[in-house]
Every structure is written in C-alpha cells, then in structure tokens.
Image (spheres, rainbow, N blue to C red):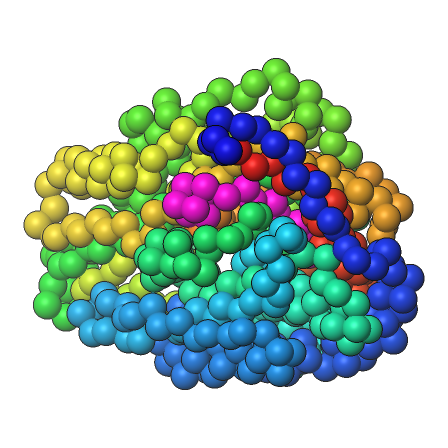
C-alpha cells in the first residue's frame, strides 16, 4: 500500500476502561496531606540554579525527582548534560536532566510533560514573612520558594500519574517526563540534550505539555504564547581597585557614573525602548488580538492593588495586556560590584556590572538583538569619551513561543477545565519566558500546550511566593482529566 499518498484517520482506542473520574478525584482528595508533605520536602531543597554555592543542592534535587519517578515504576534516566562555564572561566557540572517514561502502548498517544525544579534566589532578609525553604501553610496558601514556580505543578503531574497507578487504572496515554534544573538561568544544556535525543527519547512523543506559568485571574487558563528573553551583562571597569570617594572623588571618571549613564539610554520613563531597531521588529497587534484582549475578564484596579502601585504604565486593559504579553520591555535587574549593604560605605567601585534583560516577542530575533544592544551601548559609551572599559555580553538568548489555539490540544484543555472547575478557560499569553518551549517547537516539530495551575497572585520570583492548596489539588485533578481528554484526540497518519 502506498502509505505516503494515503491519508487515513486512525481512531485511537482511548481507554480500555471508561474514565473513572470520581474515583480518581476522591483518591486525590484523600491524599492531599501526603501531597503537601512531598511539596514540603521539595521546597526544603534550596535548588537555586543561579547560585553556584547551591549546586550540590541542585544535584540532590534532581536525584530526589529521579527517585520519586523510579519508585513509581517509571523508566528513569539521569541525563548528563555537561558543564557550564562561569564568567571567571571556571567550569561547573550542570544538574542532570531527569527523563522518565510511563507506558509504551503504540496504540496510545504519548505526551511529554516538561517542568523544572530549580528556583530563583530567596532569603528571609529579602522581606519574606516566613522561611522561604520551610513550606508554611497560612489559610490554605502554601508559602515557599519554588512552590508555584515550578515544584507543585511538576508534583501535580506526578500525582496525576500516581493516582491512575494506585487505582490500577490504565493510563489513557503514555506519559513521559523531562524535568530540568536550569530553567531559571536560561535552560543551559537542555537544547543540546533535546537535539541529541530527538530520534530516541522524543521520537514517539506526540505532544508537549508545560505547566510553568500562572492564571491571569481567578479563572483557569490555557496559555498559547510566552515572551522570550535576552539577558545582558554590561561591565564597566576603571581603576585597578576600589577607591576612597573623599580622597579620589572628583579626579577619577567613575565606572558607576558611566554605567548609570548608559543604562539610562535604554528605555524612556514612559516605557519606550530607545535601542534602534528593537521596536521596528515587533509584529503589529492585529485586530483579532485586540478583540481577544478586549474580551478577557481582567480588572485593572485589582491588578494595581495586588502589586501595590498607585499608577501603571497604561490604564486600559488592552494596552496593559498587550504590554505584558506581546511587546518587548527592558528591565534593569541589578548591579554587581555596587555597594548595596545597609550603612554608608564611601567607596568608588572599580568595576561594576549591570544585569538587564529584554523580553522578546515575535518577530524579534535574539541574535539580532544581541548586535543591536551591543552596538548601541558602545556608541552611547563612546560619546562619553570615558577612559574606562565597557564589555557587553548576552548570557541568555531565548526566543518567544506562540501556539495555534485551534489545535485539538486546546479543545481538549477547555473540556478538562470545564469538567474540573465548571468554568470556561481563559486563553492567555505569558509575559515570562520558558526558554525550551521554542526548542520543542523548532527542533522536535511538536505541538505544545501550556496548562498553568499557578494562581494569578502566587508571587513567582518575588517575596512570599506561594501555591494555594486549592490550585495544587484541583490542578492535579485537571491533569488527570486532561490525560483522558488527550486520549480522545484522533490521530492523523499520512
Ligand atoms: C515563566 C517561568 N515560570 C519563568 O519564570 N521563567 C523565567 C525564565 C528565564 C528567563 N530568563 C531567564 N530565565 C523568566 O521568565 O524569568
């Protein structure tokens, strides 16, 4: 039979058993405390990927994930992804990537759940009300670094698979996991690993599912786009060591003054990016998008109050959503080498390094942005006629991602959300970045859905990050339901 010429529809036999939703959700409800305890154990591991002093914890975190999946009977691998080069030239082992597989039935779809278990830095002194690494339940909110981003969602997927197993129910689809430990620093080493395993681990994967983002409001959501991120270091180096500002101030051209001067040329007070070429690359907002944003329920006053500001950059909903999701922005994150402790040290820092990033949207290209930013900063710096040295480096270059919401994965998501929450799903975009999303799309050619369970007010990356018990537990039920819905998608073979 001339198969390539024939388009045939194969009806996938979804499950041998009928979907026993009630039994599964009762199981989840009755195991709630156990799930919270596991999250507590995971949050207790300070798996901060940006702090080299915490690398041991990160390795331990990956071992814990692998062991959890092994105990459930998965086929588990800890994949070595090599080393990371640090700015001082030293190298450090990257945390291994955990891959796991549950089920190998060729008559079923295979989904691959991606998640990460590294976290952003957090210290009690940053202004946390509780110890960031001791999961604390206050009125049904589970506070702890990484609780929402992304440990509870990863666990919720694991619990979903575990519930089917515990009740001796056949999984409606084969489930694979890819869990990494470097997402927060740009997913170092992961692209290469995906490319290397394209024809092995990923060869039978039909769909990728990611739950590393949050809802827009109290309504459950499906996410169809993320911004990318270009992260830069701009270093200005002057005298050979720090100097007394009373003794030398007024005679030395200070690196910090140079640095602040050039940083101030990146973006105007009203949010206009001043780097030539950046705004020109942005795809214009279509009428269809405008209408979608207009129809989304989103309370601007609530948003303002939640983040504690008296005024926002834009006051209407459409402008706000557009600038949160699909326009670029510049953020200055910090300056290494600058005096930042309490007290009044009177020093001229000899070398300062600014950290800033530019969120990417279609049709921006990180390679182009790297050149635009580097050329621009050097030209601005040259005008200062400073004897100091400027070095600009792009350390992360992650592309934006956009999905087709007409794909059956999204229809399946809407049905699962309706079943669990009795609400219609919001279709939203995410202003943050999931660096690997575009790799899954470009390298594997797979369709991706993002199914967040994080709350709109979870405070990811901030002080007092939390995950509500409600979202954690109902989110687990959502994943159970979603696996069943995905099994109903018809397979088209050519
Ligand atoms: C959306 C996701 N939970 C997240 O927070 N991702 C990080 C990834 C990143 C980007 N640049 C460096 N890391 C983010 O958006 O900041």
Relative to residue 394, is residue 403 drawn left or right?
right
Relative to residue 415, is residue 278 drawn left or right?
left
Task: Locate residue 20: give its quadrant.
Answer: bottom right
Residue 406 appears at what percent x and percent y?
A: 65, 30
As rendered, which of 72 and 329 lies closer to the eye?
Answer: 72
Residue 22 appears at what percent x and percent y?
A: 91, 62
Q: Is residue 314 visible?
A: no
The answer to if 353 sits in the magenta stretch is no
Outermost residue, top direction? 287
Q: Residue at x 86, y 48 (%)?
A: 419
Q: Is residue 248 visible?
A: yes
As rendered, which of 77 and 322 lies closer to the eye?
Answer: 77
Residue 462 appears at what percent x and percent y?
A: 58, 61
Residue 129 appears at what percent x and percent y?
A: 67, 73
Q: Residue at x 56, y 18 (%)?
A: 286
Q: Residue at x 14, y 70 (%)?
A: 241
Please provide the residue range marked out in magenta.
438-456
Q: Residue at x 82, y 77 (%)?
A: 31
Relative to residue 316, is residue 484 drawn left or right?
right
Task: Locate residue 353: give its quadrant.
Answer: bottom left
Task: Locate residue 35: give its quadrant.
Answer: bottom right
Note whether 67 is above or below 24 in the view shown.
Answer: below
As rendered, which of 330 and 6 lies closer to the eye?
Answer: 6
Relative to residue 355, is residue 181 drawn left or right?
right
Q: How many dots with numbers?
A: 0
Outermost residue, front direction? 1
């Amino acid at each position: 039979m001339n198969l390539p010429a024939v388009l045939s529809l194969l009806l996938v036999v979804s499950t041998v058993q009928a979907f026993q939703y009630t039994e599964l959700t009762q199981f989840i409800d009755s195991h709630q405390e156990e799930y919270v305890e596991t999250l507590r154990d995971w949050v207790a591991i300070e798996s901060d990927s940006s702090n080299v002093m915490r690398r041991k914890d990160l390795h331990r975190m990956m071992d814990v994930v692998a062991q959890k999946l092994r105990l459930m009977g998965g086929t588990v691998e800890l994949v070595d992804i090599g080393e990371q080069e640090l700015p001082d030239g030293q190298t450090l082992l990257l945390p291994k990537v955990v891959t796991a597989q549950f089920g190998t039935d060729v008559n079923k779809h295979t989904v691959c759940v991606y998640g990460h278990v590294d976290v952003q830095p957090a210290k009690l002194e940053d202004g946390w009300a509780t110890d960031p690494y001791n999961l604390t339940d206050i009125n049904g909110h589970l506070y702890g670094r990484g609780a929402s981003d992304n440990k509870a969602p990863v666990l919720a997927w694991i619990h979903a698979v575990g519930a089917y197993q515990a009740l001796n129910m056949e999984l409606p689809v084969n489930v694979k996991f890819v869990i990494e430990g470097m997402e927060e620093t740009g997913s170092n080493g992961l692209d290469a690993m995906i490319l290397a395993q394209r024809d092995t681990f990923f060869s039978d994967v039909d769909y990728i599912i990611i739950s590393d983002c949050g809802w827009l409001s109290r309504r459950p959501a499906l996410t169809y786009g993320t911004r990318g991120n270009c992260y830069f270091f701009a270093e200005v180096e002057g005298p050979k060591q720090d100097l007394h500002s009373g003794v030398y101030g007024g005679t030395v051209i200070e690196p910090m003054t140079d640095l602040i001067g050039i940083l101030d040329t990146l973006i105007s007070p009203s949010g206009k990016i001043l780097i030539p070429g950046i705004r020109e690359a942005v795809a214009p907002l279509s009428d269809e998008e405008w209408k979608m944003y207009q129809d989304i329920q989103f309370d601007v006053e609530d948003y303002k109050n939640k983040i504690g500001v008296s005024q926002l950059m834009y006051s209407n909903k459409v402008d706000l959503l557009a600038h949160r999701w699909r326009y670029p922005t510049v953020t200055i994150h910090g300056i290494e080498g600058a005096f930042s402790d309490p007290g009044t040290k009177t020093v001229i820092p000899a070398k300062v390094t600014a950290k800033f990033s530019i969120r990417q949207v279609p049709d921006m290209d990180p390679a182009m942005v790297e050149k635009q930013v580097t050329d621009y900063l050097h030209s601005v710096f040259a005008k200062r006629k400073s004897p100091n040295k400027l070095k600009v480096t792009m350390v992360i270059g992650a592309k934006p991602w956009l999905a087709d919401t007409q794909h059956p994965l999204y229809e399946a998501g809407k049905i699962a959300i309706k079943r669990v929450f009795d609400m219609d799903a919001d279709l939203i975009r995410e202003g943050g970045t999931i660096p690997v999303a575009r790799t899954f799309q470009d390298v594997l050619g797979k369709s991706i859905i993002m199914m967040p369970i994080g709350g709109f007010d979870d405070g990811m990356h901030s002080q007092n990050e939390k995950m509500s018990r409600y979202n954690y537990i109902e989110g687990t039920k959502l994943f159970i339901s979603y696996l069943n819905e995905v099994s109903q998608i018809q397979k088209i073979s050519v």
